[in-house]
Amino acid sequence: MLLFNLIPIFPLDGYRIISELFDNIYVKEIFVYIGGFILIVILILAFIFSQFGFIIVCIYLMNLNIFKIIEISKQKKLINNQIMYLLYKTNKYC
């Protein structure tokens, strides 16, 4: 259980450790996608070995990962809008 918790999947502690190390939103987005890929691999292995508890946990974590991807894309859009506003504001007075 300890090793499973250290996998860099969004709600688990492995993702929190990585997000504290890298404060860049693009790196966080990459690790969310990597976590999704890891979840798909775990889900396939759970189907092969008939571990239905892991299947349910993986589906739940995949749902949380999708919501995190949506949240990060909204944050990126907000950051880009702020940058465009600042660029427009500085060029307006030049």
Image (cartoon, rainbow, N blue to C red):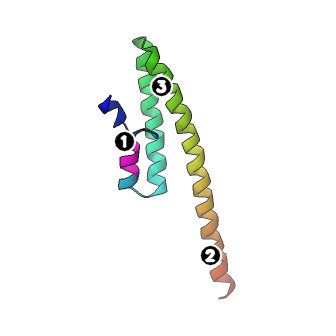
* Residue occupied by mark 3: 57
Residue for point 64% across, 69% down:
84
- Counting from the top left corner in percent of width and height, residue 55 is at 48, 20
Query: Residue 14 — which label?
Result: 1
Q: Nearer the viewer, residue 67 or 86?
A: 67
Q: Nearer the viewer, residue 77 or 18?
A: 18
- Counting from the top left corner in percent of width and height, residue 69 is at 56, 44
In this rendering, is residue 46 above or below 28?
above
In this rendering, is residue 90 above or below 66?
below
Q: Is residue 92 magenta?
A: no
Which numbered disc, 1 or 2, marks the residue that appears first in the sequence? 1
Between marks 3 and 1, how big is the CA–CA gap?
A: 16 Å
Mark 2 nearby-residue class (10 Å; few <14, some 14–19, many ≥20): few
Between marks 3 and 2, how big is the CA–CA gap?
A: 45 Å
Query: Residue 70 — which label?
Result: none
Amino acid at pointer 1 = Gly
Horizontal side of 74 relative to 49 (left or right) equals: right
Q: Is residue 16 magenta?
A: yes
Which numbered disc, 3 or 2, marks the residue that appears first in the sequence? 3
Query: Residue 87 — which label?
Result: 2
Q: Secondary structure at mark 2?
A: helix
Which span of residues is magenta-colored?
13-19
Amino acid at pointer 2 = Leu
Residue for point 38% across, 41% down:
13
Residue for point 58% across, 63% down:
79
Magenta stretch, main secondary structure, is helix
Furthest residue toward right: 92
